[in-house]
Amino acid sequence: MFIEPGIDQSRLPHAKPIGWIEVVCGSMFSGKTEELIRRLNRALIANQRVEIFKPAIDTRYHVLDVVSHNANSIRSTPVQFASDIMLLAGNSDVVGIDEAQFFDTELIAVSRKLANAGKRVIIAGLDMDFRGEPFGPIPGLMGIAEYVTKVRAICMKCGNLASYSFRLSDAKQKVMLGEQEAYEARCRKCFYEDFDPKRNA
Ligand SMILES: [Zn+2]
């Protein structure tokens, strides 16, 4: 479990609160969004100002909620571009970003600016696409983050720990959102055993 870093103000009486970046990533069905919501809820309980964003493309569930598969949800603002987050996050102490893999790579610069301005930035997203390749801005965000948490699912074929999202359908679009029937969480072995590079090209 992720434990928030404590800032010992008694040792540094004049220290200003500093920002940082956390990345929570993994395959589908790994609990990324639940972990994001857990962290954000605890900040809300402490009366911190929290803003949550997600790409406008993700309309699987309610448009204003970050919703995980287990219906544990929290209100969020859908935005078109990563740069929109800069305009809307001004007053917050904590900025949460869900489904971050669908944002443009500008999200890396945006997250850096927010953290440099003293905000805690928590990003959740898929680290790999259905071809097992690094996904969008996530690898770059992992590079500049102070804290990276890889969460794992359970392989739906063999029961081992799973890090891959295996696509069952024939649709070729990368931006196909997670429906339970279209994807399976798979371990490395089961992912590559059934992986067809031609179909997934
Ligand atoms: Zn497996």
Image (cartoon, helix red, strand yellow):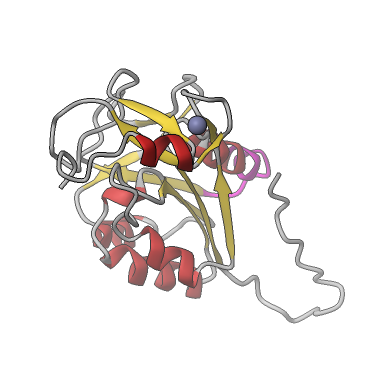
Instruction: Name the residue at the right extreme.
Output: 10
Image vertical order of residue 57 relative to residue 108, above or below? above
Image vertical order of residue 195 relative to residue 61, above or below? below
The residue closer to the viewer here, 52 or 192, is: 192
The residue closer to the viewer here, 200 or 180, is: 200
Task: Please check the rendered image and state whether residue 199 is part of the magenta-colored stretch, yes or no.
Answer: no
Q: How many labels does the image show?
A: 0
Image vertical order of residue 170 relative to residue 108, above or below? above
Q: Relative to 182, is 127 on the left or the right?
A: right
Quadrant containing the N terminus is: top right
Q: Which residue is drawn at 44% across and 23% down?
A: 69
Q: Residue at x 58, y 32 (%)?
A: 160
Residue 178: image quadrant is top left
Q: Residue at x 13, y 38 (%)?
A: 172
Q: Relative to 87, is 113 on the left or the right?
A: right
Q: Residue at x 48, y 72 (%)?
A: 144
| Magenta region, residue range | 41-49
**Residue 24 percent location from the top left of the image:** 52, 49
**Residue 105 percent location from the top left of the image:** 27, 64
Residue 186: image quadrant is top left
The residue closer to the viewer here, 13 or 173, is: 173
**Residue 65 percent location from the top left of the image:** 37, 30
